[in-house]
Image (cartoon, helix red, strand yellow):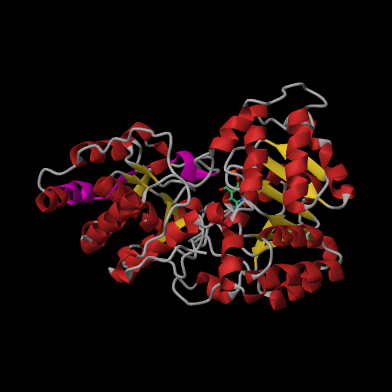
Amino acid sequence: MPVKFYQEANQVPLEMHKVRMVQKLALLPVEERIKRIQEAGNNTFLLQNKDVYLDMLTDSGVNAMSDLQFAATFQADDSYAGSATFLRVKQAIKEVFGTENVLPVHQGRAAENILAETFVTEGKVALMNFHFTTTKAHITRLGGSVEELICPEGLIPQSDNPFKGNIDLQRLRARIDELTPEKVAFVRVESGTNLIGGQPVSLENMLAVTDVCHEKGVISILDASLLQDNIYFMKTREARCKYMDIRDIYHLLADHFDIIYFSARKLGFAKGGIITSQDPKYTRQMMTFIPLYEGFLTYGGIDVRTMEAMAQGLYESLDMEYLSQAPEFIDYLCKELDSYGVPVILPAGGLGCHLNAGAFVPDMPHDKYPAGAVAAALYIAGGIRGMERGTLSEQREPDGTERFAELELLRLAVPRRVFTLSQIKYVADRVKWLWDNRKLIGGLQWVEEPSVLRFFFGRLKEINFWQERLAEKFRKDFGDSL
Ligand SMILES: Cc1ncc(COP(=O)(O)O)c(C=O)c1O
């Protein structure tokens, strides 16, 4: 439970950990920031970290490890086969999910590759609440397609629906019937959702999805990469979960879904990834791909020290004091911004605060990349690196036309156990400045556009020197401040 402050006005999220290792940060002057973002092709993925003050690009692989995780790395056993480290990972998975069948992979998308190789063939359809970039890329690469069945509220930027990541159950039933179960590769629930604001999925919805899948004879898969945050929301927003033990929630999900996979860069505060299931028939189907793509079945391409950190991190993912830190900071940032009138996705989700970039520049067409433009502008405004989650992050249609994103978002990820509250306050303040100066933000155009996953390494340039005007206004308003 959150610690209550004596004076209501002082109430802020309180960290239940202390920081014992620090990393120096640099905040460059605005004249340098504009140079660096232009050198990076206006793509925040291409910025150098030394040029970034607050790295809010992702929550993946950048979470702070605990003292116990660091300690665990020293006992790693790097024998190729029969490694004690793998047994410790298996034991942690057994404790957390209650499952025995465990395949290690080097990260989340490696699990997606193996799931796609096993279950997707030409013409098959994967049904899901919402796609994730790498998930979709693996499915379409093999001739399959993705259909999203998110509940209608999921795409409404602001509402009071606590579980905007839920699947529309009626549509799920209807689509399986229309397609026929044979054509459905699997049903995948992403909990919580990455591309639509970290919005959670309720326990009730997840169990109902698995019921439909069992009834229709379709494989159900849980992408548990963001489950840690999702569990926080279940505990705080879903009546039936309030008094449930966290471990019981994980176990219940593992009992219902045929397969669970996750990126341990998120779940477990480490790196690596896992595929697990109660029924060995699924892991048997997939295991031949592990030595082919990843490494032997006991390490799957993950360094053994990292596996030890993952095992310890998984135990920590049962601890509400750790689980709550990032969602509470995100909630604080979203509420601050909302109180300033800045459009953010509400209710706050996991992973990060999501600015509704489309509303910053309402007249900008999708193909001038509004969310990418706001991402570049925020780096200029404050040395803050966010991630575009809009049209740039989409893939073009096979005929080359743009696929416009449903939401043009700028994600400001809040890595777990990393930032202080004053840094979060700084972000809120710089975003507010940008919002007040949003008329200065202009569009972007391609210089180099890769054909696959273009948001990772594509390069763009500003249209009409708006960035120079933004930097000038910064100087005018902030004087000689960094
Ligand atoms: C929901 C979800 N699934 C899968 C992945 C892929 O995981 P990884 O980055 O470890 O490849 C991510 C990464 O951000 C994610 O958020």
Nearest to the observer: residue 77 or residue 463: 77
The single residue placed furthest to the right in the displayed view is 281
Please give left or right for residue 303 compared with residue 1 in the image. right
Nearest to the observer: residue 248 or residue 16: 16
Image location (x, y in percent) of residue 52: 33, 38
How many numbered marks are there?
0
Which span of residues is magenta-colored?
453-472
Please give left or right for residue 86 compared with residue 307 in the image. right
Please give left or right for residue 385 compared with residue 98 in the image. left
Image location (x, y in percent) of residue 244: 68, 67
Residue for point 76% across, 74% down: 173
Residue for point 52% across, 62% down: 196
The single residue placed furthest to the front in the displayed view is 6
**Does 428 lie within the magenta span?**
no
Please give left or right for residue 150 compared with residue 11 in the image. right
Quarter in which the C terminus is drawn: top left
**Does 460 lie within the magenta span?**
yes
**In which quarter of the view is residue 70 placed?**
top right
Using the image, determine if residue 402 lies above or below residue 151. above
Image location (x, y in percent) of residue 128: 67, 62
Residue for point 76% across, 33% down: 86
Nearest to the observer: residue 175 or residue 218: 218
Residue 400 in sight from this viewpoint: yes
Residue 137 in sight from this viewpoint: no
**In which quarter of the view is residue 216 placed?**
bottom right
Nearest to the observer: residue 22 or residue 300: 22
Using the image, determine if residue 281 lies above or below residue 239. above
Image location (x, y in percent) of residue 200: 58, 65
